[in-house]
Amino acid sequence: MPATIFRKGLDLKHDVANDLARDYHSQLVEKIKESDYCWKSGRLNIYLAEDFGFCYGVDRAVDYAYQTRRRFPKQNVFLTGEIIHNPHVNSRMREAGVRFLSDKHETLNNLTPEDVVILPAFGVTTHELSQLEQVGCIIVDTTCGSVLNVWKAVRQYSVDRYTAIIHGKYHHEETRATASKALDSSNGRYLVILDKREASLVCDFILEKTSPEQFLSTFSTACSPDFNPKTDLRQVGLANQTTMLMSESLEIGDMIRQAMITRYGEKNLPKHFRAFETICSATQDRQDAVTRLLHKRDFSLAVVVGGYNSSNTRNLARICSERVKTFHIADASCLISTTEIRHHQLATAMPAHSTPAQSEMTTHDWLPAIDTLNVAITSGASTPDNIVGKVVERLSELATLD
Ligand code: SF4
């Protein structure tokens, strides 16, 4: 039996609205927004970025997940993995009885056509989707429209025989899904690059400064099967994981474009290089908002709230850390005391493919004992407002104690 796929919700938006507000809303955050995004408590001045927290894609994915649970109360409901990169939201899913196919004891082989499977906002690979379709189960697809746009571009590249170079993290669900779309056509190829350092290795190969063996020693696990850099890097099209740092994506695009001009000449560039802007507007808005905030005044510190495995949150922390002492924390429990804070190691200071657990650290004497404490706060696109609200409350408590 063919799978039933829901892509536009399940007509229960109003029925789950109260549950969503109960689980993720914060009155304090609403109050701060109404007060021009600032809040004062004793010596503490909190300034919130004007764009932060749940993006439209996450909002929709979480909404659809709640609707799914409501619509199928007696059936097994699964997620393929984390619905979004926030531990609190994923815990709520588990508490509601939603199971995770990514858990060790779960397997796709046990699914039946009566089971319901929710696909996350960052989508799933072509292979995973076809496995689910073969089972014939009920699928609720919450893949974000901005991710679908990237897939469209990548598919077009592959049809036109351009290798998709994806600026992203190859182990990230969205990038794995995007890379799989490059293989929807038999001509498709992909290469995932993490940062400018890796982009310069690609440029070196394009400029014939390195051998295929040298190239593959770095990228063999980040490219499509049987990737041949000699033939597969002649025509390339750029794409991004939607949550990368915009400025870095642009620089990487420029580096590769320039290498193609040097190798093949400017007039031949269209034959060898294509680019398509695939950072989503929500990511961009959050990056722009925190940049604007940090330019407005001098801050004692910045606090960025969100899951440690959330790419867009890590990039917000990276932006802040360029201007001010910054702590990327998961939630209020990280604010242990006035002298101790648990936080994520900043992306610039950690090995490229380290796991979130490896990168948590504790810093002492983090809260300055000064008369006026100006704190900038933002949060990632997968962080609910109530988590931010609790962080503000905890900061206020600590600032009073000091
Ligand atoms: S970060 Fe962008 S692409 Fe990802 S879910 Fe949110 S809106 Fe969609």
Image: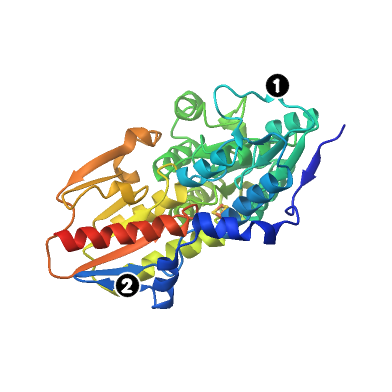
> Which one is in front, 326 or 54?
54
Residue 17, position in %: x, y?
62, 60
> Which one is in front, 277 or 402?
402
Mark sitting on residue 386: none
Quadrant for the C terminus, please.
bottom left
Q: Is residue 58 above or below residue 49?
A: above
- The amino acid type, in three-letter code, at marker 2 is Trp
**Marks 1/2: CA–CA distance:** 52 Å
Q: Is residue 127 above or below residue 177?
A: above
Quadrant for the N terminus, please.
top right
For label 1, the SS is helix
The residue most toward the bottom is 35
Q: Residue at x 39, y 61 (%)?
A: 389
- The amino acid type, in three-letter code, at marker 1 is Asn
In this figure, which residue is indicated by the disc labeled 1? 109
> Which one is in front, 332 or 145?
332
Q: Residue at x 31, y 57 (%)?
A: 303
Quadrant of the picture in which ligand 1 is shown: bottom right
Q: Is residue 370 above or below residue 204?
A: below
